Image (cartoon, helix red, strand yellow):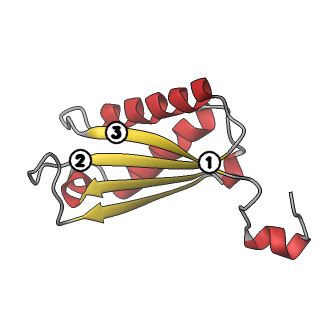
Amino acid sequence: MPHFVIDCAREVLEIQPEEVILSAIHRAAVSSGLFNEPAIKVRINPYSTYLAGGKQEPFIHLFAHILTGRTQEQKAALSRLVVAELARLFPELPKIAANVYEMDKGDYVSRQMLETGDSH
């Protein structure tokens, strides 16, 4: 935890390779100071068919899934941080956005938790 899931138009991967995007978001998450680095997961879902604003215009939307416990200010700062990093990588791309989803610690379970008997 956390999971950073990037939905994007396939065309953006012609501008920057996946590895560059994944590394940049990982570094941004680390620099936020909110997460333990080994726990950060980042992935990309490129789409070849989509509509953005009613047209097929390239876009990037990052969904940050984090456990509860951060302030509204921390979550907003995280959104700004990742959008700024994506804007740096894609200066000509106008459709870049992000939002943070909180997952309740009470119902989050990982395999590691099952194996260690950790119930929070």
Residue under the image location 23 percent in, 39 percent down? 95
Q: Quadrant of residue 51?
A: bottom left
Residue under the image location 66 percent in, 54 percent down? 1
Disc 3: which residue? 97
Q: Is residue 38 above or below residue 74?
A: below
Mark seen at residue 66? 1
Q: Quadrant of residue 49?
A: bottom left
Q: Characterize the local packing of mark 2: few (<14), some (14-19) or many (20 or more) Cα atoms within 10 angstroms.
A: many
Q: How many marks?
A: 3
Q: CA distance from mark 3 to mark 1?
A: 17 Å
4 vs 13, left or right, is right
Residue type beneath disc 2: Phe
Question: Who comes first in sequence, dot 2 or dot 1?
Answer: 2
111 vs 94, left or right, is right
Residue type beneath disc 3: Ala
Mark seen at residue 59? 2
Q: Is residue 58 above or below residue 34?
A: below
The percent position of residue 110, horizontal first and vertical second, equals: 73, 68
